[in-house]
Amino acid sequence: MSQILSSILEGVRDEYKQRMVQDAALPFMTAERLCHEMLYLDTDRMAELVEEEPSLLASRASDLIADPKERGNPSVGAIIASNLVMVALENLLAVAVENDWLRLDEEGNVMVDEKELDPTRSYPMLADYSLSQQATSNLSKPGVGLLTARFRAAEESFLQKLETEAHDAYQLALEVSSSYSVFAPDDIAPLVKENPLLLGLRPDGLVDEELFSGDPPAGMIISGHLTNILLDQLLEVAEEHGALARDGVGHMIMPEGDEDSPVIH
């Protein structure tokens, strides 16, 4: 476990113990409420945590999103935060058992009074992952960023291949954008640290629902968006070099088949 995450969870445990000493009447609700208060980290703090703990990018929304407004199309930040809430809640329930605030049944499950359980209870998302001071600051720094460098390399590769394969520019753009995509959490995490606004991305239908049963990992949501952005960039390059054109309504016209007949998409 990373140092940042360990420190955060320790802080949550300490706060829980203090609250329970003051009032131990509702151990489960106190734990649940506290986790939602403290684990919805702000964008820049979450980005630091992701950089140190890339495995968080494997988090999935499942049924963990407590804010009804986020459930249909949750942001990457909301998905990770909700998983952190679950981890912290499990830790606090263990603390409650250790201190006899809660008990285990014969099978080792934590017993919670019905008055504390409410399946309709929701918690608003306290963090706005579309805002980041760090992202704004990084934009003004000199030098080429990690994502920009990757996109430039992809564009250079695309242009080289376009010289001999201009007749198949669209397929070429698909291949290059795919080959320069990032999928591994260890590769995506530095990009998140560089631009925390990536935590604000949402599935938006860009990730194959069948592949992940409609519940894509947070990292794949970022990957899907970056791949789509790169593809659009390469198609624009192809258009600038005369390899692709648009019809009267702005649709890209691309050659298809042996006769390179244009097809409107």
Image: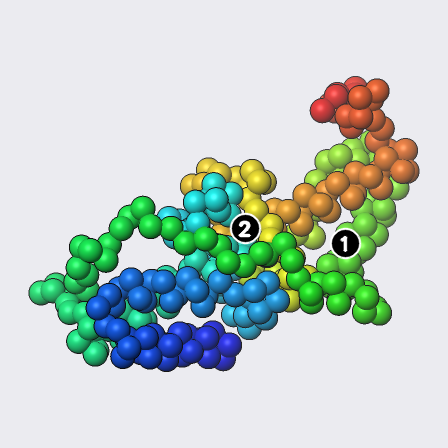
Give the spatial CA distance, label 2 vs label 1. Answer: 23 Å
Residue occupying the far right of the picture? 241
Eyeballing the image, is 132 above or below 63? below
The label on residue 63 is: none
Name which residue lies at 90% across and 33% down. Answer: 242
Whether pointer 2 and pointer 1 mark residues with C-beta atoms closer than 8 Å, the reply is no
SS state under label 2: loop
Q: Is label 2 or label 1 in front? A: 2
Does 166 sit above or below residue 264? below
Asked if residue 242 can be seen in this view, the reply is yes
- Residue 227 placement (x, y as % from top left): 67, 47
Q: Mark 2 points at which residue?
A: 75
Which amino acid, mark 2? Ser
**Residue that badge 1 annotates:** 151
Between 249 and 26, the residue placed more toward the observer is: 26
Residue 144 located left or right of residue 225: right
Horizontal arrangement in the rendering, residue 84 relative to residue 137 (left or right):
left
Q: Does residue 73 lie above or below 92 as drawn? A: above
Residue 187 seen anywhere in this rendered image of the structure? no
Identify which residue is drawn at 20% across, 55% down: 115
Residue 165 falls left or right of residue 67: right
How was this image coloured? Answer: rainbow
Amino acid type of the residue that numbered disc 1 sits on in the rendered structure: Phe
- Residue 95: quarter of image: bottom left
In this rendering, the count of numbered labels is 2
